[in-house]
Amino acid sequence: MSVVAYIGLGANLGDAAASVQQAVRDINDLPGTTVVETSSLYRTAPVDANGPDYTNAVTKIHTSLSAHALLRALQGIEKQHGRTRPYRNAPRTLDLDLLLYGEETVDDAELTVPHPRMHERAFVLHPLYELNGQLVLKQGSLHELIARCVDQPIHRLR
């Protein structure tokens, strides 16, 4: 069984654009997983944090991995890219967030899907809209949610 999932990617340390692009290739190499499409890269200021601007994107995948197995695989890719977690919202070499996993809702100690804050973040909503503008989250359509984030500057890089 294959599920459509969306993954948010971001980095603001080192060569952030190269890290995000390599992470897409790493995700495509996961067992039972194929990258279908990846958004443009976007530059955004950190949210609730300090540090350099982020490079962000969203990728759409088909995967036969369970949501929890996919999360663990994404955390492994972050670790390969030198991700450390010294404190909440610390600058990072790579951040991978499982945004959506099919129509499933998961809420346990390890994983919350749909991602609980994606509807508030322009750096997720804009690239997600680029991939699937018809997507509707429980908080509203992507178009409506983007309109609520106009105070968050975002710049498309490519």
Image: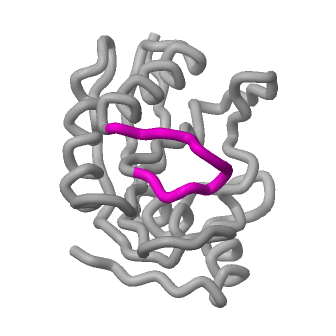
Locate the C terminus by quadrant: bottom left
Residue 134 versus residue 82: which sits nearer the camera? 82
Residue for point 52% across, 87% down = 153
Look at the picture and state if 56 lies above or below 105.
Answer: below
Residue for point 42% across, 55% down = 10
Where residue 119 appears, x then y in whole percent?
70, 61
Residue for point 19% across, 55% down = 18
* Structure colour scheme: one colour
In the picture provided, is 135 more to the left or to the right than 111?
left
Magenta span: 82-92
Residue for point 38% across, 83% down = 155
Look at the picture and state if 23 lies above or below 41.
Answer: above
Residue 111 versus residue 119: which sits nearer the camera? 111
In the picture provided, is 141 more to the left or to the right than 129?
right
Q: Residue furthest front?
A: 86
Picture quadrant of residue 147? bottom right
In the picture provided, is 26 more to the left or to the right than 98?
left
Picture quadrant of residue 108? top right
Where residue 48 appears, x then y in whole percent?
68, 69
Picture quadrant of residue 118? bottom right
Is 90 contained in the magenta span? yes
What type of secondary structure mainly makes up the magenta span? Answer: loop
